[in-house]
Image (cartoon, rainbow, N blue to C red):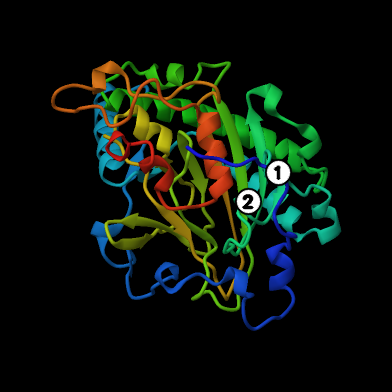
Amino acid sequence: METTDLHGWPEPVVPVQILSNSSMQTVPQQYMKPPSERPDMGIISGINDPNLRIPVIDLDGFDDIPEHRQVVLAAVGDACRNWGFFHVVNHGVDIDAVKRMRGAWREFFDLPMEEKKVYANSPATYEGYGSRLGVEKGAILDWNDYYFLNLLPSDAKNLEKWPKLPCNLREATEKYSCELVNLCEVLLKAISSSLGLADDYLHRAFGGSDGISACMRVNYYPKCPQPDVTLGLSSHSDPGGITLLLVDDDVKGTQVRKGNTWVTVQPITGSFVVNVGDQIQILSNGAYKSVEHRALANSGADRLTIAFFCNPRGDLPMAPPPQLVGPESPAVYGQPGISFNEYRKYVRTKGASGRAQVQALSLANN
C-alpha cells in the first residue's frame, strides 16, 4: 500500500463547533460532498421495515448456559456474515459507568474553545482534539469534531493528552475503558468460536493480554445548517478488529450500508452497537464482512457518540489461519499479511474512503 509521511495537517484546522456556533446559513465549500456522496433521504430505510434493522444479540448467560451459548454463537456468525453489525444487550457493562462517561464528554465539548484547543492533535497519532481525518490537501471534510485517545497497551497511553477538565473525565474514561475491554474479550471469544476456531484464537492473533491494543474516539456532531449536502462522517469501514459504538439515545444518525440501502441504526437504550473491522474480515478469510457505515449531520440538535476500538498489536501481520483456507474457501488475502501499523498508516493518510483499503489487499486485486 502506497503511503505518505504523516506530517502536520495540510491546511489550518477550524473546529466544526466554531462554524456551527457562527449562525452561518450554508456550510463552507470544503464540507460539501459531491452529489453521489450526499445523503439521499429517499433510500434511508430501517424505521418501519423490521427486515432492515441490525440484529440484536442477548449476551445474558453466554458463559454460563451451554444452550444459550450455542444460540449466541449462531447469531454472532449470522450477523457477521450478513450485516457486519449487531446490537448487544445484557452485556454486563456497568450502566452507571456509561452514564458518567457520556456526561463527562458532553461537558468537555461544552468547554470554551481555548480549553479544548490545548489538546489539538496531529495526524502522527491522532491523539487529542481534532476535526479532520487524512492529510490530503484540498480533501472534502466531514462535519464533526472528535477526541481520540490511545488506551492499550499501557505504554501507548499518554496521560498528557487526557483532558484535565471536567475534573471527573479521566476517572470516568478509565472506568469505562476497563468495562469495555472486558466486553471485547467476550466478543472476541464469541467471534472466534463462531468461526469454528478455538475461543482464544482471536485473542492470541491480536497479540494476547499484553499485546491487544485499544483506542477510543469520542465523536461530536454539532448542528449543521445544511445536513443534506454534507456528512457527519464519510462512508468507511473500520480498519481495526472490532468496534463498540455507544450511540446517542436521543438523536439518530449512524447508518449502515446493506446492499444499496443505507439503514439507520435505531438506538436501543443500554445497548452497544458492535461492528466487524477490516482485520476480522482478513482473519476470517472474507467470511465475516467489515461493512461501510457513515454518520449524518443534523440541523436540529447536536449528537455525541463514543467509539471504542479493539485492535491487533501493531506489528503483527494479519492473515487467515490455515483452518479457514482450503479448496472450497481459497485464500482471499496473501501471506504473511500486512501489519496493522502499516494498514492504519494508509488509512490515516487517505481518511475515510469507503472500503478501498481492505479491497486493495485482496489477491483478486493484485
Residue at 49% from the left image edge and 47% from the top image edge: 270
Give amino acid for label 1. His
In front of the other: 45 or 37 = 37
SS at badge 2: loop
SS at badge 1: loop
Left or right side of 84 for 67: left
Residue 10, image x, y percentages: 69, 55
Which disc, if any, is residue 7? 1
Residue at 45% from the left image edge and 70% from the top image edge: 38
Give amino acid for label 2. Val
| Residues packed near mark 1 inside 10 Å, few (<14), some (14 to 19) or many (20 plus) | few
Residue 344: image quadrant is top right
Residue at 27% from the left image edge and 38% from the top image edge: 364
In front of the other: 212 or 364 = 364
Q: Please tell me how many numbered marks the rendered image carries.
A: 2
Extreme residue toward the left, this view: 328
Residue 127, image x, y percentages: 70, 41
- Which of the image's four quarters has the C terminus? top left
Q: Which residue is mark 2?
A: 135
Residue 261, image x, y percentages: 30, 63
Q: Earlier in the sequence, mark 1 or mark 2?
A: 1
Left or right side of 163 for 154: left
Which disc, if any, is residue 327? none
